[in-house]
Image (spheres, rainbow, N blue to C red):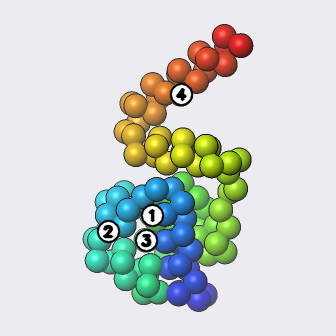
Amino acid sequence: MDLNNLGANIKKIRQAKGMTQEQLAERADISVNFMSLIENGKNMSAETLVKIANSLEVSVDNLMCGATKPSGNKISEQIMQSLYSLDDNEKLFFLDMIKQYKNLK
């Protein structure tokens, strides 16, 4: 496994989700310094890799291969980035609003 590519993939996915290193480190329960080292090719345990994948809401395979789910367009990306920063209650609120909107159509 090429740790430099793995680190680059983590960084690319993190940035695509509009997250900072600090946000990802907090979600993965690791230090910001360690997160920086990982993105620069530092070795990590399988447990840490799984924590990062879960925090990014992608599979370990996506991190290792660099595959990201393509978004529909720029508007979808902006919506996803905006929603990602919300807490779970706020996300549920907007999910409910979307469902209600779709039912009105």
Of marks 1 and 4, the one in the foreground:
4
In the shown orientation, is residue 61 left or right of residue 21?
A: right
Residue at the disc numbered 2? 30
As drawn, is 23 to the left or to the right of 9?
left
35 over 98 or under it: above or below: below
Of the numbered discs 2 and 3, the one sitting upstream in the chain is 2
- Badge 4 vs badge 2, beta-carbon distance below 8 Å: no
Identify the secondary structure beneath mark 4.
helix
| Residue 14 position in % (x across, y down) | 48, 63
Task: Give the structural element (helix, strand or loop) at label 2.
Answer: loop
Q: Which element carries disc 1, helix, strand or loop?
A: helix
Q: Which residue is mark 1?
A: 51
Mark whose residue sits in front, 4 or 3 = 4
**Which of the numbered marks, if any, corresponds to residue 48?**
3
Between disc 4 and disc 2, whose residue precedes?
2
Circles 1, 3 touching at the beta carbon (< 8 Å): yes
Alpha carbon separation for disc pair 1 and 4: 25 Å
- The amino acid type of the residue labelled 1 equals Lys
Give the CA distance from mark 4 to mark 3: 30 Å
Q: Pointers 1 and 4 in contact (CB under 8 A)?
A: no
Marks 1 and 4, the one that precedes in the sequence: 1
Q: CA distance from mark 4 to mark 2?
A: 30 Å
Q: Residue at 64% across / 72% down in the picture? A: 66
Disc 4 designates what residue? 95
Q: Are marks 2 and 1 in contact (CB under 8 Å)?
A: yes
Answer with mark 2 or mark 1, whichever residue precedes in sequence.
Answer: 2
Image coordinates of residue 6 in percent, x first then y, are 55, 79
